[in-house]
Image (spheres, grey):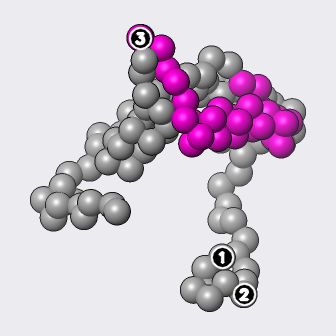
Amino acid sequence: MRKPIPEDSLAHHRRSIRLKGYDYTLAGAYFVTLVTWQRECLFGRIVDGEMCCNELGEIVVKMWLETAIVRPHVVLDAFVVMPNHAHGIIVITDNGVGASRRLAPTEKCNHPTGAV
C-alpha cells in the first residue's frame, strides 16, 4: 500500500539541473537516474557489498538492455541498478531520427477506466 504524500511536501519541488538554453532534443550522451516512488527499495538489496536484484530489479535490467534493440538510434553505456534507483548513460545518435517536440497521439481504448 502506498503512503500518502504529505501536504507540505507537495509544495517542494526539486531544482532543475537542466542546462538553460540547451536543446535536449539533440543527439548526445545523457546521464539518467530513475528513482522509485518514495525511494522504496523495490529492485533488490545489497548483500556483502554487492547488489542482488530481485524480480523487479531483473526487469529493470532487461528493459535497459532492450532499449537499444527497440530504439536503433540509441547506444547504451554504463548502467547500474541499486535497491531504490538506477543510473545509466544513454547515447542518442544522430541518424536522422532525432527527438521532436510533439505530443504523443492518444486514442481511446476499451479499458474500463478510459485510460489510453
- Residue 69 in sight here: yes
Q: Residues within 10 Å of mark 2 (few under 14, many from 20)?
A: few
Residue shown at 59% from the left, 40% from the top: 55
Tell me: 84 left or right of 69. Answer: left
Tell me: 72 left or right of 85. Answer: right
Identify the residue under disc 3.
Answer: 48
**Residue 44 magenta-highlighted:** no
Q: Which amino acid does label 2 sit on?
A: Asn
Identify the residue under disc 1.
Answer: 116
Q: Nearer the N terminus, badge 1 or badge 3?
A: 3
The relative height of residue 100 versus residue 1 in the rendered view (above or below) is above
Distance from Cα at disc 2 to Cα at disc 3? 48 Å
Q: In terms of secondary structure, where does tag 2 sit?
A: loop
- Residue 24 in sight here: no
- Residue 106: image quadrant is bottom right
115, 58: nearer the viewer: 58
The magenta-colored residue range is 48-76
